[in-house]
Amino acid sequence: MIRSMTAFGNARADLEQGTLAIELRSVNSRFLDLYFRLPDELRHVETPLRELLTTNLARGKVEIRVSFTRAASADLSKLDPAWLDSLAEQLQAARRIIPDIASPRLAELFNWPGQRGNDALDPQIWGAACLQAAQQALTQLQEGREREGERLAGMMRECADGVARVVDIVQAHLPQLLADHRERQAAKLRESVESAFPGGFTHISGAELSERLSQEANLFALRIDVAEELSRLRSHLEELRHLLSDGGGKPAAGKKNAGSAGKRLDFLFQEMNREANTLGSKAGSMEVTRAAMDLKLLIEQMREQAQNIE
């Protein structure tokens, strides 16, 4: 399955003590880079979150944001008398040493951390809720990656079909290209011989003429023979369709794929671009030159799309 590296996922968990929200934002990257934005009260969940993400994601820059909101309660309008007595005793003890300590204001008492025994976050309860929400957000993220990946794969398939059409055109043009060159080469050789020997071909033996023609033909064959390049391009297209159909195969259970589809595609496009360059350098006609340029354009379009494949 081809997956993009660009996606978004979010989820929330509702508890009696409040609500926890988590967001996962992913963009393309050469490796898997995780950036956590966690409140201090939930720092203990970073390690299990990291394990969850590294197990399920191969590449991408992923930002993880976690926030929580305490639930509103009717008890917020009341202060615990026992807690107030304890606070008053501590204030009197402090004033015996520092007499000018001011009394806290009423608003400060309502917002005082820990003025109720259940005000603090329970690490186990909130940690479990965070992991549950993270799993839901991760599922949403993966679904978004798959949808975007399928769109990218569709674009690359269209470009691959264009490459195949160009290769077919060049393949069909080769016989005519060879025939045209034979005519040009024969005319050129005839002009050279007549220029050197005004008497015509009577001053050059048949063996010499055959040898000269053979040399010219061999040099030309080496220069414009692009059958090997076309064959390799067809082979690369088959591998490309294989990668786009299933992401290059599924890894064994419990193991990550040895090479991500994105990296394999990038390498494949480098090889295809090399063949297109060689085809252009061997071009024996303007048609082949244009074909090489079209190939390079299509390959570059696919390579740009592959930059965002996981």
Image (tube, rainbow, N blue to C red):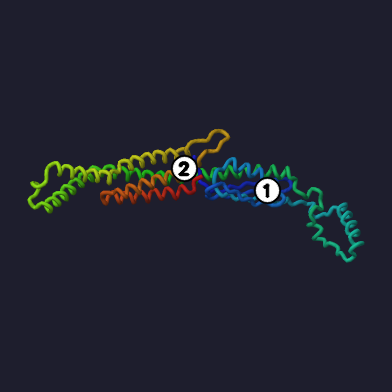
Instruction: Please indicate whether residue 223 sits to the left or right of residue 67 in the image.
Output: left
Q: Which mark is residue 264?
A: 2
Q: 79 or 151: nearer the eye?
A: 151
Q: Residue at x 87, y 56 (%)?
A: 87
Q: Position of residue 9 (x, y in %)?
A: 58, 47
Furthest residue in direction top, as rendered: 253
Q: Residues within 10 Å of mark 2 (few under 14, many from 20)?
A: some
Indicate which disc, 2 or 1, sits on the residue closer to the N terminus: 1
Q: 188 or 226: nearer the eye?
A: 188
Separation of marks 2 and 1 at Cα, in angstroms: 39 Å
Question: From the viewer's perspective, is the residue at label 2 or at label 1 nearer?
Answer: 2
Q: Position of residue 281 (x, y in %)?
A: 31, 50
Q: Residues within 10 Å of mark 1 (few under 14, many from 20)?
A: some
Q: Is residue 228 above or below residue 116?
A: above
Q: Which mark is residue 74?
A: none
Question: Given the image, on which type of amino acid does mark 1 rest?
Answer: Leu
Q: Which residue is mark 1?
A: 20
Question: Given the image, on which type of amino acid does mark 2 rest?
Answer: Arg
The local secondary structure at tag 1 comes to: strand
Instruction: Please indicate whether residue 197 sits to the left or right of residue 300 in the image.
Output: left
